[in-house]
Each structure stands twice: as C-alpha cells, then as structure tokens.
Amino acid sequence: SYVLTQPPSVSVAPGKTARLTCGGNNIGSKSVHWSQQKPGQAPILIIYYNGDRPSGIPVRFSGSNSGNTATLTISRVEAGDEADYYCQVWDSSSDHVVFGGGTKLTVL
Amino acid sequence: EVQLVESGGGLVRPGGSLRISCAASGFTFTSYIINWVRQAPGKGLEWVSSISSGSRSIYYADSVKGRFTVSRDNTENSVFLQMSSLRAEDTAVYYCARDLGGVTEPFAFDHWGQGTLVTVSS
C-alpha cells in the first residue's frame, strides 16, 4: 500500500518560513492536499491539488509537488499557525485515501 | 453555510455494533462524495470510507472492510456508517467530510464536521 512520510515535528521562529515535507514514491504524479488541525478542532483544508488554496486561506500558505516530495510552505509564520499538518493523496492502485502521519508545527 | 453534523457515537462493547450518522446542509448534497475519517486519541487522521453521490462508488480502508458499511439517503441529506464487530482499536473520533470535487473518486476534503466519539470498551 502507498505510504506518505512526514516528519513528526518542525519548529520555526515567528516571522520565518516553515517548510513541511511529505514523502512518497513518485508523489509528483499525484494530487496532494494539505489540512491543518488545531487542538480540539476538526481539520481544515488549506491546500488542494498541490498548490491551490481554498477561499479564506492566507497566501502565506503555498504548496509544491515534484519527484518524491511534496512541500507545504508557510511564510511569515505566526503563533496562530501552530498546529498539526497532514498531507493526503488518492492512491488509485489500491482505491484508498492515504494520509501522512502528520507534522506538529511549533512556533518558538 | 455548509454544515456537517455527526451523531450517534457512544460507548459500545467489543464485538458490538453501532450506527453513526452525518447530517448535511447548506449545499447540494446529491452532487458530492462524502467521506468518513477517524482519529484515535492522540493519533493522526485515518481515512475510513467514501461514498459517491449516487452510491455507485464505495471505498473502504482495509482496517474496516467487511465490518463497516457506508450508505447515504439523498432524500434526507444524510450519510451513515454502520459499524459491526467493533474492536478496541476502533475507538476514535469519527468525522464526516465533504469532498471538494471528486466525482467517482475522493479528492480533497473541504468541509468537516466536528466529529462524534466512538469508544469500544468492556
């Protein structure tokens, strides 16, 4: 089955740029989506189709996808960005939705 | 406003059954795939099942296939997850989520409910 690998944690200072990775075999051939989840809340979609943003999501959030790695980039990080971030794909080989294990973003 | 409201969670004994529901409003329900995702305490997100708008395409995670059944009632704008042969490892918050644009296959999940807690314990 298809596996998505995310680092368990990333730390960044306020105002800096955070880059969260999502690794998978030839993930560049798939559409990658990213969700943000804050403690006690349901997830919200922040990036879909590799780099598109739903309405209301700040432009500070961007995404890219190539080769074996997809990346969520958060520019000018704010304290309110502290959350868990999950990448997600559809694996047509198994007809399964696959989530990465999630990355906890800590704002120092 | 798009709303998804889960209900029906609770405490059930191992081997037991439970049906949870997802009531949708604020959008044309018959045009969207609906998905179920669960989250065990302190753990990450795990996809459970997806059902297409007309129920023709249904998908299950390996961990629940043969034990869980997803269905929908387009006249009631509701989706259901019938869970049987429940195990301790099924304990989780269960979320329903609307699909952004998939037709027969799930794509991205753009609206989520607040979840319902299912606890499997003796």
Image (cartoon, rainbow, N blue to C red):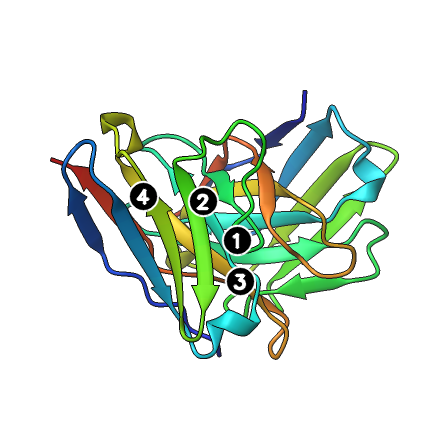
- What residue is rendered at 67% in x and 44% in y? B100
Please give the residue where the numbered disc 3 appears in the rendered image. A89
Taking depth in this image into account, of B29 and B116 the one nearest to the observer is B29
Label 2 or label 4, whichever comes before in sequence order: 2
- What residue is rendered at 41% in x and 40% in y? A61
Within the image, what quadrant is residue A67 found in? bottom left
Disc 3 chain ID: A
Label 4 or label 3, whichever comes before in sequence order: 4
Q: Secondary structure at mark 1?
A: loop
- Residue B106 lies, with reference to residue B11, above or below; the image says below
Q: Secondary structure at mark 2?
A: strand
Q: Tell me residue B108's x, y (percent).
A: 60, 50
Disc 4 chain ID: A
Q: CA distance from mark 1 to mark 3?
A: 32 Å
Please give the residue where the numbered disc 1 appears in the rendered image. B16
Q: Tell me residue B24's x, y (percent).
A: 71, 30
Neighbour tally class for label 2: few under 14, some 14-19, many 20 plus, Cα within 10 Å = many
Q: CA distance from mark 4 to mark 3?
A: 17 Å
Name the kind of residue labelled 3 in the image.
Answer: Val
Please give the residue where the numbered disc 2 appears in the rendered image. A35
Label 3 or label 2, whichever comes before in sequence order: 2
Name the kind of residue labelled 4 in the image.
Answer: Asp
Q: Secondary structure at mark 3?
A: strand
Within the image, what quadrant is residue A101 found in? bottom left
Name the kind of residue labelled 1 in the image.
Answer: Gly
Marks 3, 2 in one chain: yes
Please give the residue where the numbered disc 4 appears in the rendered image. A84
Neighbour tally class for label 1: few under 14, some 14-19, many 20 plus, Cα within 10 Å = some
Disc 2 chain ID: A
Q: Nearer the viewer, mark 4 or mark 1?
A: 4
Q: Nearer the viewer, mark 1 or mark 3?
A: 3
Q: CA distance from mark 2 to mark 4?
A: 8 Å
